[in-house]
Image (spheres, rainbow, N blue to C red):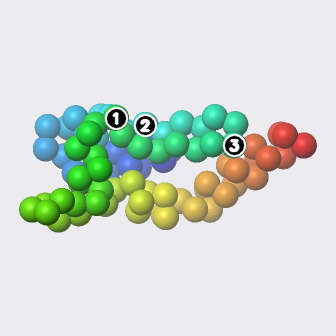
Amino acid sequence: MLGEEAKRRAAVGTGELRDSMRAEVDGTTLTLGSSDPVAVFVEYGARKMHARPFIAPTMEGNLGLIKALAEEELRKLG
């Protein structure tokens, strides 16, 4: 879900950034990110490159889903 949306939002040059996107849920921890070292520069920009955020907008646009997933996991913990 979130990983697929982040992939849609990611800047695409070679496709490596898009293909490196992962979303994982481990208990009460949600991780959304990229293994591509370029991701941080795309997300936040650099001195000669403007930011093109894709991870933060994905998280912000899905806060309801994230909250529901967190509540579900917390219920499982009792």
* Front: mark 3 or 2: 3
Q: Find residue 60 and report its horizontal and vertical position in percent.
A: 49, 64
From the viewer's perspective, is residue 71 above or below residue 33? below
Q: Which residue is mark 3?
A: 28
Q: Is the Cβ of the residue at disc 1 closer than 8 Å to that at disc 2?
A: yes
**Residue at image location 83% in from the left, 40% down from the top:** 76
Q: Is residue 64 left or right of residue 59?
A: right
Q: Kindly report the distance in space between the C-alpha atoms of the residues bearing marks 1 and 2.
A: 8 Å
Q: Kindly report the distance in space between the C-alpha atoms of the residues bearing marks 3 and 2.
A: 17 Å
Judge the density around disc 1: few (<14), some (14-19), many (≥20) Cα neighbours within 10 Å: few
Q: Residue furthest left?
A: 48
Q: Is residue 46 left or right of residue 30?
A: left
Q: Which badge, 3 or 2, is on the more N-terminal residue?
A: 2
**In which quadrant is the C terminus drawn?**
top right
Judge the density around disc 2: few (<14), some (14-19), many (≥20) Cα neighbours within 10 Å: some
Q: Kindly report the distance in space between the C-alpha atoms of the residues bearing marks 1 and 3.
A: 21 Å
Q: Amino acid at mark 1?
A: Ser
Q: Which residue is mark 2?
A: 22
Q: Is the Cβ of the residue at disc 1 closer than 8 Å to that at disc 3?
A: no
Q: Is residue 74 left or right of residue 5?
A: right
Q: Which residue is mark 1?
A: 35
Confirm whether residue 70 shows in the render. yes
**Residue at image location 70% in from the left, 50% down from the top:** 70
Quadrant location of residue 51? bottom left
